[in-house]
Amino acid sequence: LIGSLLVGVNTAKALALVYNKPLIPINHVRGHIFSNFLSRVKNEINFPFLTLVASGGHTELIISESLINHRIIGRTRDDAAGEAFDKAARLLNLPYPGGPSIGQAAEKGNPEAYKLPRALSSKTTLDFSFSGLKTATKKQVELLSIKNENLSNKQRNDLAASFQAAVVDSLISKVLLASKKFGCKSICLAGGVAANRRLREAFIQIAEENGLKFYFPDTEYCTDNAAMIASAATPIYLENKGQSWYDVNTQRQPAL
């Protein structure tokens, strides 16, 4: 999406110059982290804290050591969690976006009906992988379709529940591993997938069981929004006394 980024950056430069306002470049993943501060005071979450950003384009584990310093410690090696939900929904003939539609179908299904893989389950990595889960779901759909031509509502709901359980298990296992490795007592959830009800419930449970504090943004702030970008820009603005970055350019993999 480099074309749209170039247009956006140059438009922002022009507006900043015309209105004499500081220009602060913000990685939108950093914005997702700060979506957790929109409904609470910033000193409520203790440093260092761990954030799982799960969306259509990102699945990353990020350690925040201050309001300024953030470090990626794990990421998906293929599909993002939200992308996997979208692809699975397409396989199950459920509407886009896949997260909400699979979540609704899963509420009526059995999460143990089908045995689907949890990739990279080893405790030696904090990375994620969802391509194998997508392939396993595709094969299961094909197998059921051969037998019955079309999936029944029960089969669709059971597959949705089993798929969702596999994604949730994978995300939670890595968050727990990272929180123990880096000594984080506060964990945050962010990104579009953070709106998934089952994922929130699972995080609340594991947080209670492991003595962790768990935070997540209001649903309206889970997807990309301007408020989270302003929230992320504020500490940078204060730290640099209103400095402006008029020479900012686009990067394919900008630092947090």
Image: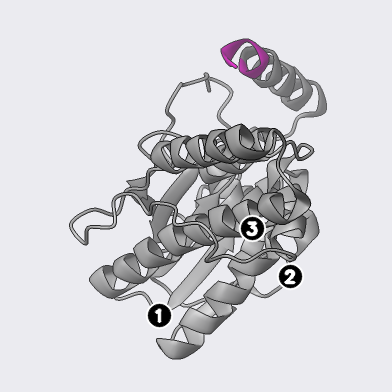
Which mark is drawn over residue 126? none
Q: Nearer the viewer, residue 208 or 97?
A: 97
Q: Nearer the viewer, residue 32 or 68?
A: 32
Residue 159 shown left or right of residue 185 in the figure? right
Sooner in the amino-acid sequence: mark 2 or mark 3: 2
Q: Hey, which quadrant is residue 194 in on the image?
A: bottom right
Residue 93, percent across and down?
A: 74, 36
Is 3 magenta? The answer is: yes
Q: In the image, which residues are magenta?
A: 1-5
- Residue 211, compared with residue 72, is above or below; it is below
Label 2 sits on what residue type? Ser
Residue 189 shown left or right of residue 20 in the figure? left
Q: Nearer the viewer, residue 9 or 84?
A: 84
Secondary structure beneath dot 1 equals loop
Gap between marks 1 and 2 measured at Cα: 20 Å
Q: Hey, which quadrant is residue 39 in on the image?
A: bottom right
Secondary structure beneath dot 2 equals loop
Residue 153, percent across and down?
A: 77, 51
Dominant secondary structure of the magenta stretch? helix
* Labels 1, 2: front one: 1
Residue at image location 45% in from the left, 63% down from the top: 169
Residue 248 shown left or right of residue 18 in the figure? left
Q: Is residue 24 visible?
A: no
Question: Which residue reaches farthest top?
Answer: 3
Label 3 sits on what residue type? Asp
Tell me the residue that label 1 is attached to.
185
Tell me the residue that label 3 is attached to.
158
